[in-house]
Image (tube, rainbow, N blue to C red):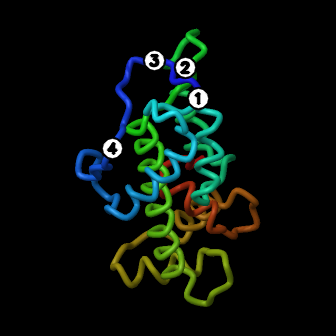
Amino acid sequence: QVCVSYGVSAMSGHFSWKKFARPGITQDELVEMKEAFDLFDVAGCGVVDIREVQTALQGLGIDSNNSTLHAMLSELSAMDGDTGTRGMNFEQFIDVMAARSAERDSKDDIQKVFRLFDEDHKGYLTVANLEKVCKQLGEQYSPEDMKEMVDRAAVGGGGKVTFDDFYAVLARRVFP
């Protein structure tokens, strides 16, 4: 493979993880990301084709249909404009991975909160669950207000809020 100049220097030699440190990403994770990135940077240019990055991310267990990932890859493609390079350097790769990691951590935290609400382990929340939590927290809402909250959050209707519904509301994606 011939190394085409993409306006970035090649990352050759010893990998210095500290140079790429990001909050929430461990040294081991950075090393793993670098190894995945290097699999596709055969010529050592420090840049890989964005289409190949999708394959690398799948190798790291990241779903290629992930909406955050898809949006970031599209944004990076747009940044390349009409040059046809579609190249992504290692720092951009880390940014994509860091966003995915933050989303995963956030979803895990929200899952824990959902389980606290779903004390009877039904897999969904009802007005009764909300009433109990409100009482424990000393919050006072009318039964009508709580029913409205559940009805607005329950995408499938029926007064049952699934984890996906709950996540969408808490991740501020939707609250009809």
Contact flag, marks 4 and 3 (Cβ < 8 Å) = no
**Which mark, residue 5?**
3
Q: Are marks 1 and 4 in contact (CB under 8 Å)?
A: no
Three-letter amino acid code of the residue under disc 3 = Ser
Element type at mark 1: helix
Instruction: Identify the mark nearer the N-term, 1 or 4.
Output: 4
Q: Which residue is mark 1?
A: 74
Q: CA distance from mark 3 to mark 2?
A: 19 Å
> Depth-wise, is mark 4 or mark 3 nearer the camera?
4
Cα gap from disc 4 to disc 3, whole angstroms = 18 Å
Of residues 79 and 176, which is closer to you in this image? Answer: 79
Residue beneath the point at 75% across and 60% down: 156
User: How crowded is the residue under tag 3: few (<14 C-alpha within 10 Å), some, or many (20+)?
Assistant: few
Residue at image point 60% right, 48% down: 56
For label 2, the residue is 78
Question: Where in the figure is residue 101, as x and y percent of width and height?
Answer: 45, 56
Q: Earlier in the sequence, mark 4 or mark 3?
A: 3
Comparing marks 1 and 4, which lies closer to the viewer? 4
Residue at image position (41%, 42%) is 95
Question: Mark 4 — residue?
Answer: 13
